[in-house]
Amino acid sequence: MLTVDLDSPEPLYEQIVRGVRDAIARGLVRVGDRLPSVRQLADDLAVNLNTVARAYRTLESTGLVRIRHGQGVVVVATVETPAGPDARADASAALERGVRKALADARLAGMGAGAVRRMVMRTLEEHERTEERR
């Protein structure tokens, strides 16, 4: 379900959070689905248990999952719904920062604008196909 890049400057727990959010957004994981246990995901990704626990706590704080000791981690929402215009503006600003970071990473990797544009278009098309299947 998830992968992490041990060489990435992005913290591992943030990579896990992003991966789970992406899986939820794409409909690969739905409300009511259980996520792997902390131990199982840590083993699968070859990362520390505390890294996965931190990612799950972060996801819980955003309202996407519920953690119940002994029962596991369950997806409880499909979308993080910002409350009010200030929250939407904050979410938009955070998204723009993410895009700018991705563009900087692409530049550092030697990717030109055309390659990035093609990658974005492929990703959008994949997202649209996933949305159509829902």
Image (cartoon, helix red, strand yellow):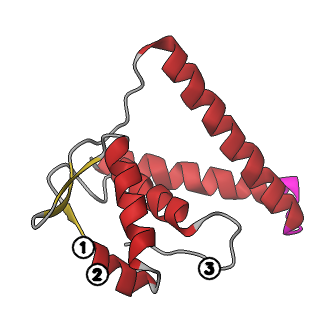
Q: Position of residue 77 (x, y in %)?
A: 25, 41
Q: Position of residue 98 (x, y in %)?
A: 67, 45
**Residue 81 makes an appearance in the image:** yes
Image quadrant in which you'd find residue 10? bottom right
Q: Position of residue 57 (x, y in %)?
A: 35, 54
**Element type at mark 1:** loop
Name the residue carrying label 2.
40
Q: Is residue 120 magenta?
A: no
Q: Of 24 and 49, which appears nearest the observer?
A: 49
Tell me the quarter of the image containing the N terminus.
bottom left
Mark 3 belongs to which amino acid?
Answer: Leu
Mark 1 belongs to which amino acid?
Answer: Ser
**Residue 130 makes an appearance in the image:** no
Majority secondary structure of the magenta segment?
A: loop
Mark 2 belongs to which amino acid?
Answer: Gln
The label shown at residue 16 is: none
Q: Of 66 and 82, which appears nearest the observer?
A: 66
Considering every residue shown, the one lying at the far left of the view is 71
The label shown at residue 6 is: 3
Q: Position of residue 89 (x, y in %)?
A: 58, 21
Name the residue carrying label 1.
37
User: Between marks 1 and 3, how big is the CA–CA gap?
Assistant: 21 Å
**Element type at mark 3:** loop
Looking at the image, do the residues carrying marks 2 and 1 touch, with CB atoms under 8 Å apart?
yes
**Element type at mark 2:** helix
The structure residue drawn at horizontal position 23% and vertical position 52%, both measured from the top left corner, is 30
Instruction: Magenta stretch: give its range.
Output: 109-114
